[in-house]
Amino acid sequence: MQQYPLQQQRACTSRGVLHGLAFSSAGGGRAPCSSKASPLLPVGPCLETGPNPQWTVQAERGGGFSPAGHFRTRQTWAARDAWGQEAASDQPGLRVSLSWLHCTQPQRWGETSHRHGPAPCCHGVPVARCSPDRLPQAIRHLSQPSLGAGGEASGAWSPPGFLDSLLSYGAPGVEFTGLHRETATVTQMHFLPGQGRLLSLLDDNTLHLWEIYHKDGCSHLEEIRSFALPGRPGFDGANSPPSIARVTVILLKSACDVACLGTEGGGVYFLDLSGLTLLEDKALFQDEILQSVPDDYRCGKALGPVESLQEHPQDPSKILIGYSRGLVVVWDEIARKVDHLFLGNQQLESLTWERSGKTVVSSHSDGGYMVWSLNSSSQKTLQPLLSTIPYGPFPCKAINKILWRTCESGSHFIIFSGGMPRASYGDRHCVSILQGQTLVTLDFTSRVIDFFTVHSTEAAEGEFDNPRALVVLVEEELVVVDLQTPGWPTIPAPYLAPLHSSAITCSYHISNVPLKLWERIISVGEQQNPQLSSANWPIDGGKNLAQEPTQRGFLLTGHEDGTVRFWDASGVSLKPLYKLGTANIFQTDCEHNDSLNQAEEEWPPFRKVGCFDPYSDDPRLGIQKIALCKYTARMVVAGTAGQVLVMELSDEKSEHAISVATLDLLQDREGFTWKGHDRLAPKNGTIAFAPGFQPSILVQCLPPAAVTAVTLHSEWNLVAFGTSHGFGLFDYYRRNPVLARCTLHPNDSLAMEGPLSRVKSLKKSLRQSFRRIRKSRVSGKKRVPTSSPSSKVQEANAQLAEQAGPPEVEVTPVQRRIEPRSADDSLSGVVRCLYFANTFLRDATHHGPTMWAGTNSGSVFAYALEVPSQEKFSERAVEAVLGKEIQLMHRAPVVSIAVLDGRGNPLPEPYEVSRDLAKAPDMQGSHSVLISSEEQFKVFTLPKVSAKTKFKLTAHEGCRVRKVALVSFASAACEDYAEHGLVCLTNLGDIHVFSVPGLRPQVHYDCIRKEDISGIASCVFTKHGQGFYLISPSEFERFSLSARNITEPLCYLELARRHDGTCLGNSFPGTPKMSQANGTNILLGSEASHSPADSDRTSEEHQAAFSLTPIDSPNSSLETPVDSTGDITVEEVKDFLASTEEADKNLRILSEEDARLLGILIK
């Protein structure tokens, strides 16, 4: 029996707030951090970087977002022991691999150990939302620009035990992740150039040293030391303010041997990085600085916290120190004296050197900046050469950060954030780029956290910086601007793309995408953004060791603004490919808003950048369901206002009108009045469409409630859709409706209020609650004194099992009593699932097209379809006849329906058999239908619909089914062997895998926190054992249950350490269990599915443990007669196709087998 280890991966959405970004670049004469001066990228409130960046550090804090467009894959633990020893490929266990997608607040996946492997595969963007007082103002320029690292903090939303993490990014697929043992926010990160080491600062004032080491051919990141800064000597710790020694800014000296720490008390401390020890003899306090300050400037006032520390670009022994009050000094470490004083009269925000070291630029709280010259070395106290407020003269906001970059081909660059006029544009989030007379104000839709430039630091490259790109980290996304191309266009990011540019409302995965469709989607996507830069991604450090994906996969996300986005989900990084918009089909206010934006004033010269736009013109545009046929490139998109769009992919732009059809699902039923939103009015006349998916038909459901289910069968030219009122079938070839069925209960009035209505009946809710309580008490009292023959049979069977069973067999657990749901419960008519199948419904000898629908009240409708051949599509219409109607007695919502062929395999998709892409189904043996409700799984034979086998999940496990999928598990040992399994996700966040069609439990894992309701609701399974779910509004997590199909980052970074060639760490023992990002525990190896006592068992004994299941055990799924006594459901099956003689025959057979108590009545 194939076992299914589970690997979890994280796609970025928005569970962590970005707190900082660090970037490392290659410096002259410094040891390279990789064989090539290629940069890597990070994300956070601060950015650590330098020219030609190689490392970038990202800091996140819980409650924010994470850079999107990228999957973070978690280290596989089930198939590996702690740090790399390969285990059996088919060994059960939880496998977790994370990926970045653009999302808000990336949730942390972690381990209780401090050792960390390659960065998890996560898709999304962590939201950077650190408060301004914690926002690091400076980005360090480090040599070896190749890797970017990010810090991620567990915000208040994180469960106990989550650790702060560092995320490092380089070339696509190169990722490293480290988790702090402390649960504090990461505020700053700094690279040690050429050493493969990283220094992080937490908000608890502790410093942590990290190191990249090599093991098993891959690079890993681990923490090796930590340090806490003590208070100032001579001060009573109990009486002195606790913040006096809090670190505000860090400067790493170019030699990478000492770190300078500026504090809120105004002191500067020096830390030896080799052992993280304090150099007390070098400490500098304000008292020593004030001795050189003129008396008229001193005025008895303190200088304030240290706001900035900058090393002299030409003389490493001198440091530029800026204090909050406005004083800036050049301090000579060797002579311990002040070389120059800059007496600023405005509160200081940031400092930067000009490359030659002859000019200093300071930015201030009044929205201005000053330029200071150091040419006259004889003068100690200097005055500014230039003082200007770029967006004055009216009061402006502070310039939080400023950079000065020289350019050989023209004027220098001045880049700064903030400085907008308070009254007019105080709410704008801007970064301004000024070169000569050219000024561009980059306007972002979320707060600017940090930014840096990718430029040259090699001395051999001349006296100019020549910046290549500007990297801006904002709260919701990461934007890179090409500074070498005229017009300064943006560079598309290969990762950290914002998934949540508009709120995600649904997701849909497509496996094994044909090459032709793949290329067409990429082509139309490239035509959408011709204004993007063609420059290479500037952060390209490290080497991606992961193999090329064997399968191409699409992840489609529907959004609140009516867009559908296509993502490349084949590998570690989630890359945006194409965006489809539906708002232009309807009459909205979009065009009006666009005209208003164009009519804005030209000063400041704003330019909208980034794609994060959380606002929707109309909530009815939201996409609820998606279905796509990958062989015919036809897609169905359904929305919140009952709109169903049938689209087809076109490589050319066109202009045509859309056919509109309406379908009344109420069927003129009396007594129902729709109180919700109105339908969306389509535009009249022809509409221009760009290359891509172009709509041809709009089917409008009435009432215009949100579409809850949709399915497409392109071979039959049929689309089925359902709402809270009923379901419909539409022939899009002949453009006419085939079927409309109302599923409302007479008392289901709440379904008429709509999802956007606030009208709810409190009395009705209370009345229903009391009714359930009374029914529970009455049914409990009635069952106590009864002693039926069937109960006696059960007791006898139980005693017989106890006597005959082996002593090691577990006793059957007590089943939970499940109360039936009321028929008049609210929203009982919601259509939960729709399904097309070619199977036996009329009789056992003739098969044909069928359509199945399952509702919230436990009803299943099966229709026999008369579909003409392809040659007669235009001559004959499709007909639908009700064949079967099944009612689950306890009215549990039907989650999924699937038909199994004679071999017990799921039926192939349309066109798969005709194109030799799948084996033809077995039409000789008897088919069966697998109906999954929220409480149990049950297999019925076809066409008689008699119970064959079942598994009562709610009765045995106490949980309810939320998501179900039939998955093909390929063996890791044998390429030709695969088997199907039923995978389900419960409301507790557990994942169960069952065999098909026997419904034998295989494995059971914790995957999602049970409190994460939105994450459970957003989960989508792939056909090959992987899955995605939102761990935040902006971040997907990716998991895998397959031992063969695993997505995880495997990367390598060449190191040339200057101090020593060995790893300082590697002394900490691994931990056999790691805590998942969402709070669940990930068990390693056999611990995931076996008790500690099972560790000594052989593989044969483990197999026996699965097979030695008592007949009356809840796990038993033998195809024995089903005893309905005490069963969860007793189904009522109505057969509308059987003749009277056949019905009489069925009743006689049932009376002969009365002892079996099937509980199935065939009318």
Image (tube, rainbow, N blue to C red):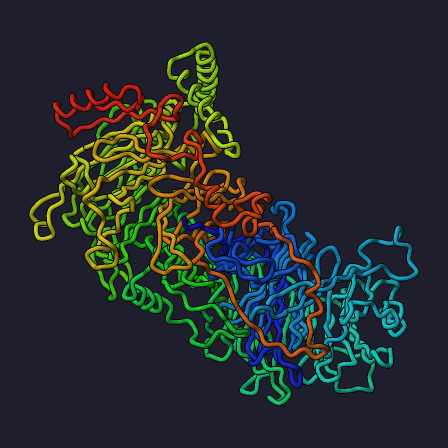
Above or below, comparing residue 1127 to residue 28 in the picture: above
User: How far across and down, in percent of the image, does residue 627 sit?
Assistant: 30, 50
Vertical placement of 1141 versus 347: above or below? above
980 relative to 714 in the view: left or right: right
Image position, residue 322 (x, y; %): 76, 70
Snapshot quadrant of residue 677: top left
What residue appears at the point 75 percent right and 75 percent down from the top-left corner?
257
The residue shown at (13%, 41%) is 866
Residue 1144: image quadrant is top left
Is residue 256 shown left or right of residue 286?
left
Measuring from the top left, give residue 1007's x and y in whole percent: 51, 46
Q: Position of residue 968 (x, y in %)?
A: 36, 51
Q: Quadrant of the C terminus?
A: top left
Q: Is residue 701 visible?
A: yes
Q: Residue at x 66, y 65 (%)?
A: 189
Q: Is 1115 or 138 nearer to us in this picture?
A: 1115
Q: Residue at x 45, y 59 (%)?
A: 1046
- Observer able to see residue 621: no
